[in-house]
Amino acid sequence: MGAALTRYRVIAWIVGVVLIMLVVIGMPLKYVFDNAVVVETIGPAHGFLYMIYLVAAFDLSRRADWPLKRMLLVMLAGTVPFVSFYAERRVTGWLDRPGERAPEPALKSG
């Protein structure tokens, strides 16, 4: 599960940074200065990266055996500026603390 967590953490940061660039730089340029070049460039990139984020979050959630609600909330975190950073820290915390994880299936002997 370590590789899935690493993939998720990397893409969460990338999606978060690109979304902040889009909102903080691109939107003011488009609506205040009538220059849509940043939105036209970064917008599709964010959309593509968000699809990768969804795949990584889904993969991690299946490996960690999360409930559907947790999985959906983590997936939605990439749509609100700064929330993907918070979600990445929470997810890392959940997976670093064994008490927060779903129990491993017991091996039957005999």
Image (cartoon, helix red, strand yellow):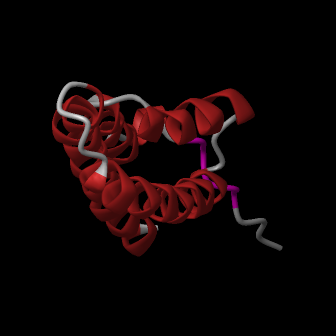
Where in the figure is residue 91, as x and y percent of width and height? 38, 41
Is 71 situated left or right of 34 in this image? right
| Image quadrant where residue 85 sits | top left
Say which quadrant the C terminus sits in.
bottom right
| Image quadrant where residue 45 sits | bottom left
Residue 3 higher or lower than 75, as above or below: below
Front residue of 107/32: it is: 32
Farthest residue, direction front:
34
Range of magenta residues: 102-106
In the image, is residue 105 part of the stretch drawn in magenta? yes
Q: Residue at x 43, y 41 (%)?
A: 78
Is residue 13 visible in the rendered structure shown here?
A: no
In the image, is residue 109 part of the stretch drawn in magenta? no
Is 32 situated left or right of 104 in this image? left
| Image quadrant where residue 22 sits | top left
Residue 103 higher or lower than 53, as above or below: above
Where in the figure is residue 25, as x and y percent of width and height? 16, 39
Front residue of 109/95: it is: 95
Where in the figure is residue 53, as x and y percent of width and height? 48, 58
Is 49 situated left or right of 13 in this image? right
Is 17 situated left or right of 46 in this image? left
Front residue of 38/88: it is: 38
